[in-house]
Image (cartoon, helix red, strand yellow):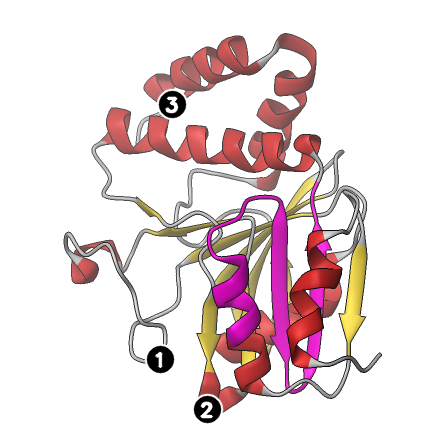
Amino acid sequence: MTVQTTSYYDIVAKLPSDTVVTFHGVGWQDYEDLLEQVGEASGLRISFDNGTLTVMTLSTEHEKYARFLEGLMTTIRLRQRINILSFGSATIRKRKKGKGNEPDACFYVQRAEALGNRIHLDFEVDPPPDIAVEIDLHHDSSSKLSISAALGVPEIWRYDGEHLTISVLQQDRYLAVPQSQALPFLTGEILTQFLTRLRTDGDLHALLAFDQWIQSQQL
């Protein structure tokens, strides 16, 4: 699909929720211009892969799961005194590689100390987050894995509404593993359990249950 640069935003701004649109033959500057026009608008995820620009609009359900996982990480940070930095759906991009992606959430764990108290990151020079989250309720993020691999994201969590799977980067591909590399006490099974409780018990009770679980662990 080929359009004039000035019309990308016009199209994206009118998309309904849970929609994906792909543009081909897009230049890097066009991609950056769209990011600037969109700004920090919620409800959108934009990826770029060597001229292929993909824009996805999100549902409130999609955002609910992503924010809940951020809540779990906050609980770990406070209870276990682990320095975990959250950068939400930060745009991770590298012009030299022609790649860019916006996960639904991302976290620094092993590399958190190296970043210190910085708020602004430049992914042309800064390392990628240790964990990136993809919520795959209505759309499969597998096509974006090659982008994350090229950007060097070590670990991906993918949740499809039923199960959360953890994959780690080995050479240039992601392989499924039972537990987190960044936070080994977390498994796909445990995270799935509490995401299920979010649906059945609601945010507060699910977070309180996770808080109790964290306190019971010998970490």
For the residues labelled 2 and 1, say whether their Cβ atoms are less than 8 Å apart.
Answer: yes
- Say which amino acid is labelled 1: Glu
Q: Secondary structure at mark 1?
A: loop
For the residues labelled 2 and 3, say whether their Cβ atoms are less than 8 Å apart.
Answer: no
- Say which amino acid is labelled 2: Lys
Residues rendered magenta in the picture: 33-58
Image coordinates for residue 203, horizontal then vertical, percent: 54, 15
Residue occupying image coordinates x 29% and y 65%: 121
Question: Which dot marks residue 124?
Answer: 1
For the residues labelled 1 and 3, say whether their Cβ atoms are less than 8 Å apart.
Answer: no
Residue 149 appears anywhere in the view: no
Which quadrant does the N terminus fall into? bottom right
Residue 196 appears anywhere in the view: yes
Decide whether residue 88 is among the magenta residues: no
Q: Nearer the viewer, mark 2 or mark 3?
A: 2
User: What residue is pinned by disc 3?
Assistant: 214
Residue occupying image coordinates x 69% and y 53%: 13
Q: Within the image, what quadrant is residue 90 found in?
A: bottom left
Image coordinates for residue 42, horizontal then vertical, percent: 55, 44
Q: Secondary structure at mark 3?
A: helix
Of pointers 2 and 1, the one earlier in the residue sequence: 2
Question: Which dot marks residue 96?
Answer: 2
Q: Nearer the viewer, mark 1 or mark 3?
A: 1
Above or below, 26 against 154 in this view is below
Of pointers 1 and 3, the one earlier in the residue sequence: 1
Q: CA distance from mark 2 to mark 1?
A: 8 Å
Q: How busy is the neighbourhood of tag 3: few (under 14 within 10 Å), some, or many (20 plus)? A: some
Of 139 and 183, nearer the camera is: 139
Residue occupying image coordinates x 51% and y 88%: 97
Q: How busy is the neighbourhood of tag 2: few (under 14 within 10 Å), some, or many (20 plus)? A: few
Of pointers 2 and 3, the one earlier in the residue sequence: 2
